[in-house]
Amino acid sequence: MGTTEVINPATGRVLTTVPSLGVAETDAAIERAQRAFVEWRRVAPGDRARLLRQFAATVDEHLEELAALEVSNAGHTSGNARWEAGNVRDVLDYYAGAPERLSGRQIPVPGGLDVTFHEPLGVVGIIVPWNFPMPIAGWGFAPALAAGNTVVLKPAELTPLTAIRLGELALEAGLPADVFQVVPGKGSVVGQRFVTHPAVRKVCFTGSTDVGKAIMAGCADQVKRVTLELGGKSANIVFADADLEKAAAAAPSSVFDNAGQDCCARSRLLVEQSVFDKFLALLEPAVKAFRVSDPALDTAEMGPLISAGHRATVASYLDGADVAFTGSAPDGDGWWFPPTVLLARSTGDRHWREEVFGPVLSVLPFRDEEEAVRLANDTAYGLSGSLWTRDLGRALRVSRAVETGALSVNSHSSVRYWTPFGGMKQSGLGRELGPDALLSFTDVKNVFLADS
Ligand code: TAP
């Protein structure tokens, strides 16, 4: 077993070192989870519910500690990190209601009784990225455990600290040993073993589209279940009749929140031609006022990027680009990058087409509703998006026409733990959160009992 250094992205300094598991240790964890499944699936629904509620309560007791870990490890602002820890608590509480409600159907058939059961799958492997380590972990493990599965969770190498702590808190809350294990290590080692080990019955992956495709191809070999939450290049469409002041005030956080390292970032801004200049004039002061600072300060709206390498990647999108205006960012240590607004010359611009995953907003005008929809859909992705209009008919028409898993009208809200979340096209496969996610951690069994 090796070790990995964990870096604070706001200072560039080493915070601590954590274990990096090899194949043998990963196999051992998977096999322990397989043995634990035998008992966990038989735990009475009310008892499983109580354990998940206790886990939620334990997370709540340690909310400030978890948030502080995420501020130092992922560079998240204190406000965001508190929300993220609270989200894990809420997701656990929500799915704690599931074990007693997860029921099959009785289907009328001649000659006997036909009933369906929602059976847990077995060991579920969850692979988490570095951008939202806590919520994305919780969106996988809470419904998986509620449905009676056991879980092995691999955090991103860059951000393992909150996941490791959540593993300890699960034990503190009374979850039986090996029902929920955190296995830190490299994606190419630990994550890859989730794909190839036959005892792992489902892989939940969130991360880049390329790795997601490789995981899906690897899972095909064993017809292994897979949920993929991949990238995005979401559109923020502003029509001339919208409340422009409100739309402009909301636009910066919709793309610069979490330093743009957000698969739901509205990184393509489409503005109706007739109000294009007016809208940019409203947007500029809002971007310049966006507070980028030490993420531990309560006033911070944005912290640093996750790593030096990622900052270089984000910076490469500015090469030869037409910069409209930028905000400011601290100098000195840490992987800082200012909020940046680019004018797209055409839809062929690299920054317009690719997921930058940084605080970079690309802007383009459109002529009419038909062109807005065409431009919004001119991408391989389909995860999220927003549209701003006061015309109810147009809101409905455009909402139906944009190919995306989540869309908000006159807001930028994408995620609520009781509603489904996931992507269309190359943004992913399957849904997280809400009742849909719970069922995705089960297989349906049909049983017929003859009456004679
Ligand atoms: P990925 O390489 O996709 O990493 C995401 C997770 O997958 C990490 O836990 C990673 O482990 C693991 N992983 C990597 N290779 C694997 C493999 N062959 N088998 C199994 N697991 C594997 O993303 P990244 O390099 O961190 O970021 C690259 C780009 O992906 C970003 O710039 C962004 O565009 C996109 N991204 C999207 C999202 C969302 S929410 N859709 C999240 C993060 C990144 P290690 O940490 O050990 O590499």
Image (cartoon, grey):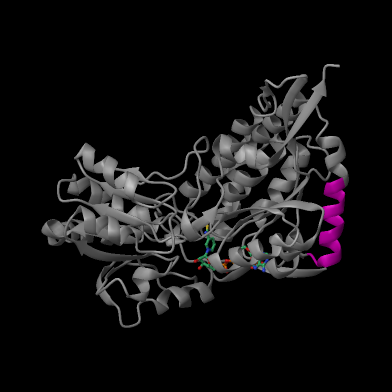
Location of residue 195 in the rendering, given as x and y in whole percent from the top left corner: 73, 61
Location of residue 274 in the rendering, given as x and y in whole percent from the top left corner: 11, 58
Query: Looking at the image, can residue 34 be seen?
Result: yes
Location of residue 179 in the rendering, given as x and y in whole percent from the top left corner: 79, 43
Location of residue 60 in the rendering, given as x and y in whole percent from the top left corner: 61, 36
Q: Residue at x 63, y 33 (%)?
A: 95
Residue 432 is left or right of residue 176, and the answer is left
Image quadrant occupied by the C terminus:
top right
Among the 4 quarters of the image, the one containing residue 220: bottom right
Quadrant containing ligand 1:
bottom right
Viewer-side residue, 426 vs 14: 426
Magenta stretch, overall SS: helix
Q: Is 33 a magenta residue?
A: yes
Q: Residue at x 85, y 47 (%)?
A: 34
Q: Residue at x 61, y 47 (%)?
A: 66
What are the residue bounds of the magenta stretch?
A: 21-34
Q: Among all residues in the image, which is located at the extreme top?
A: 452
